[in-house]
Image (tube, helix red, strand yellow):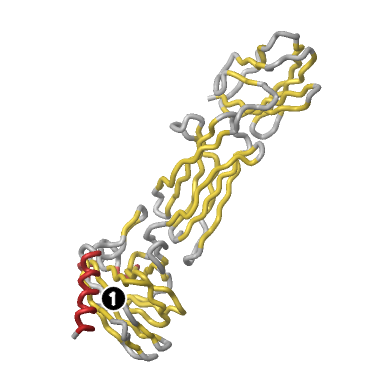
Amino acid sequence: MGRYLKEALAVSLWLAGLADVAAQLSVGVGGMTIKEGAQLHVSGLEFRPTVDLQISSLELGVSATPASGDNGSGIARVYQFSSPLAFQGLLRLYYQLGELNGHAESDLVLAYRPAVSQPYVLAQSSTVNTSERTVEHTFGGISLYQLTATGRLVPLPLQLINFSAVADGARSRIFWTAQGETGVQAYRVLRSLDGRNFDLLEEVSGKVSSGGSNDYMVYDRLPAKGQNYYKLQELDVKGNLHELGIRAVNMGLDKSGFLLFPNPGSGPFFLDVGDPVAGKLEVSLLDAQGRIVSQEQIAVNKGQQRYPILRRTVLAKGMYVLRVQGADGDTSLKLIVP
């Protein structure tokens, strides 16, 4: 009697912790064994292990609320275990037409989460039987925390494990790690100087993943002095964009003391040489492809800090690099013409 009360209490706690979930299976500490090749049916889910399956201290709940995320949602049936179950063998889900949530029967695949903190993995080679209304897949060995079904090209939530941007010498390095990328077409990295108006820096194709994580990296080779903002977006296979966050990198001020302004700007432009020393400076303007747009020489006078530059140059919109060469070395400054 004491053991029965303990198991009943476990089911009650399980129900209290999950909204819209009904407990369908409860196994106490004594456990149970499903022999290889045997079948266990629980509320429309069939287990057929290919090795003996030991189960103990485990509850299984069923929810009618679809698993959903930015990229779409699954059918209106989600199975969840109280703790991950190590399973090897066939899983067969018997669905009802009213649970399809807009998915075509022929497009269904099983989708599972290995653990509470991990994204869904789609079993792309799942088999659908529309006569019996089943979708099934034989797994070689997985950790099973949640199970549902979804469309083959409608992935459940992408998990962004990391997204960072840092100064890397004179460049900005933007990098991120993602899991659960089925259905990801590409990532877009955008940049901004004010955190509001962004332009595309680079687009990177997504990598097909079966549950593992993938790393990505992009460089901004001409960041502006001061604050630079980088936005990460995901482009899914349906052409929808999803915002993944914004990171900032402060490149600081040039150690030489040079300052180009207005920047961004369209002119007239001035170069502040900081603490001036009499001499000559060679000033070259390069476009984003590294081609020289203009060259001039500045005669620096002691006590004079500010000098007009680029007076005879008409600049198209875009990004440029101003290279200043003097007796103390070379300095490169980024110029943006909006």
**Secondary element type, mark 1:** strand
Question: Residue visible at 28% across and 65% down?
Answer: 75
Residue 275 relative to residue 61: left or right: right
Which residue is more in the foreground, 136 or 331?
331
Displayed quadrant of residue 168: top right
Q: Residues within 10 Å of mark 1 (few under 14, many from 20)?
A: many
Q: Find residue 53 and report its horizontal and vertical position in percent.
A: 38, 85
Displayed quadrant of residue 227: top right
Look at label 1 and name its amino acid: Glu
Would you name the residue on which mark 1 appears? 59
Question: Residue visible at 28% across and 74% down?
Answer: 60
Displayed quadrant of residue 155: bottom left
Q: Is residue 74 visible?
A: yes
Question: Residue visible at 65% across and 27% down?
Answer: 254
Which residue is more in the foreground, 159 or 28?
28
Which residue is more in the foreground, 126 or 180?
180
